[in-house]
């Protein structure tokens, strides 16, 4: 088989006989033969426990971030509007956990009802990414905390006010003392660590796709499986890959077409992407490739919130990132696959049971 051909085991499984039943064992023979002749990664492990270890996407292991004792304090901070300049906005205002970890708006509303400049991504699984924000300007979920707190349009405060507020609260004083080596003063780094420790707990294992990766043959519908085949054969996986199905590289938005010219609205600072950080021409319109986990419940899409539905977003990707004309079949199957990326948090499907 030529290198780079469409992975035949997926196509075979997607169009094969009805799932389940006695044929399941036999249906593995052809795929295994293919894996063997390709010399693909740990074949013995695939036989042993059924886990699909040679896929470009890996499941979320529940123990990825063992919860730290500070996470509970972080949860309280995350939900406390008292941290914001006018006492009206918390992290949860823009990242409501019962609604997919984002506000469902193209642009968020911060203190004083001000409109933000860029779409709010979900906080779920953000800790799995190589960096935070659309332009990857913060290295991790602790360094990220200063962004929303100090942004005049988001929480509109400063560290002096935040610390004074926390110091004035007996329970916060006791909790910080307990978790940070009896520190006599609450410091910004303690606040960053507590919130970051909580955000690290916001991972969502258990999606149908992860269950399939872990060896559950019945976790995906034939349509979803075929959609995953397209995701790989069309080339989506070149950018959206790894444990977060994205979140591990920067790429230009509009590689094979001028997305921004076609959008028809003026180019704003936020559209510059990574360029705003580096001032390097090569970074113009480069963004962090977003994670696609839970993407079925996190509309609207893109840094500008311009795509209202998953169908719209997938159509744009096929045109501007892959330079192809999308067929209705591509869209339908890819969306079905993306719907299989909705995981669980707190024992519930992310997004309050919408999607799957
Ligand atoms: C007013 C709305 C608003 C508030 C309040 C807010 N955020 Fe955000 N959040 C956003 C927006 C918008 C972005 C994207 C900013 C960017 O990329 O430049 C974002 C990005 C993030 C990211 C990065 C996600 C990613 O995929 O890159 C994390 C993590 C995050 N916020 C956590 C928090 C925490 C923790 C707080 C509270 C300290 C908070 N946010 C408060 C709107 C908000
Ligand atoms: C060359 C890299 C690249 C390829 C290939 C690619 N993407 Fe993307 N994808 C991106 C980037 C970069 C963004 C963020 C664009 C923006 O908002 O600025 C994105 C955003 C998305 C979003 C929106 C996510 C959100 O939360 O806003 C979806 C959905 C998506 N891609 C799906 C796909 C699918 C399906 C394919 C294959 C048909 C694909 N992508 C191919 C780089 C890529």
Image: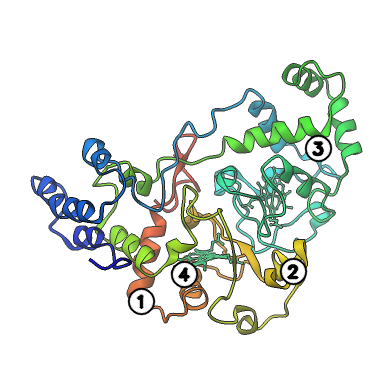
Q: Image point 72% across, 77% down: which residue?
A: 267
Do callouts 3 and 1 mark residues in contact (Cβ within 8 Å)? no
Using the rendered view, name the quadrant where residue 143 is placed.
top right
Dot 2, crowdedness within 10 Å: few (<14), some or many (≥20)?
few
Do callouts 1 and 4 mark residues in contact (Cβ within 8 Å)? no
Do callouts 2 and 4 mark residues in contact (Cβ within 8 Å)? no
* Dot 3: element: helix
Q: x, y percentage for residue 114?
A: 80, 59
Mark 4 C-beta to ligand 2 under 8 Å: yes
Q: Which residue is mark 4?
A: 314
Closest to the camera, between mark 3 and mark 4, is: 4
Do callouts 2 and 3 mark residues in contact (Cβ within 8 Å)? no
* Dot 1: element: helix
* Dot 2: element: loop
Q: Image point 25% across, 44% down: which residue?
A: 43
Q: Which residue is mark 1?
A: 328
Of the two numbered discs 2 and 1 on the same chain, state the one appearing first in sequence. 2
Mark 2 C-beta to ligand 2 under 8 Å: no
Q: x, y percentage for residue 233?
A: 35, 67
Q: CA distance from mark 3 to mark 1?
A: 48 Å
Identify the disc placed on residue 82.
Answer: 3
Closest to the camera, between mark 2 and mark 3, is: 2
User: Is 286 situated left or right of 189 in this image?
Assistant: left
């Amino acid at each position: 088989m030529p290198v780079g051909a469409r992975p035949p085991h997926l196509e075979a499984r997607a169009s094969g006989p009805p799932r389940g039943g006695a044929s399941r064992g036999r249906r593995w023979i052809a795929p295994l033969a293919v894996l063997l002749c390709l010399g693909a990664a740990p074949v013995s492990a695939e036989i042993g426990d059924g886990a699909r270890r040679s896929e470009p996407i890996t499941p979320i292991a529940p123990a990825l971030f063992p919860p730290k004792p500070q996470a509970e304090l972080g949860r309280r901070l995350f939900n406390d509007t008292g941290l914001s300049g006018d006492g009206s906005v918390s992290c949860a205002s823009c990242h409501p956990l019962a609604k997919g970890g984002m506000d469902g708006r193209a642009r968020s509303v911060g203190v004083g009802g001000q409109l933000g400049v860029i779409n709010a991504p979900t906080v779920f699984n953000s800790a799995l990414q190589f960096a935070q924000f659309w332009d990857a300007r913060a290295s991790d979920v602790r360094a990220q905390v200063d962004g929303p707190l100090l942004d005049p349009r988001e929480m509109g405060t400063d560290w002096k006010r935040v610390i004074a507020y926390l110091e004035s609260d007996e329970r916060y004083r006791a909790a910080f003392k307990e978790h940070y080596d009896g520190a006599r003063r609450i410091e910004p780094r303690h606040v960053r660590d507590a919130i970051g420790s909580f955000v690290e707990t916001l991972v969502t294992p258990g999606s149908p796709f992860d269950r399939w990766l872990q060896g559950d043959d019945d976790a995906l519908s034939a349509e979803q499986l075929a959609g995953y085949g397209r995701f790989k054969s069309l080339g989506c996986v070149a950018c959206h890959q790894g444990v977060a199905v994205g979140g591990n590289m920067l790429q230009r938005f509009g590689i094979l077409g001028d997305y921004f010219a076609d959008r028809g609205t003026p180019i704003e600072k936020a559209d510059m992407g990574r360029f705003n950080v580096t001032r390097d021409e090569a970074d113009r319109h480069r963004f962090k490739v977003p994670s696609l986990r839970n993407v079925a419940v996190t509309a609207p899409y893109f840094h500008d919130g311009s795509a209202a539905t998953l169908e719209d977003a997938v159509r744009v990707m096929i045109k501007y990132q892959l330079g192809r004309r999308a067929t209705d079949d591509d869209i339908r199957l890819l969306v079905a696959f993306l719907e299989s990326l909705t995981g669980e948090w707190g024992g519930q499907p992310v997004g309050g049971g919408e999607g799957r």
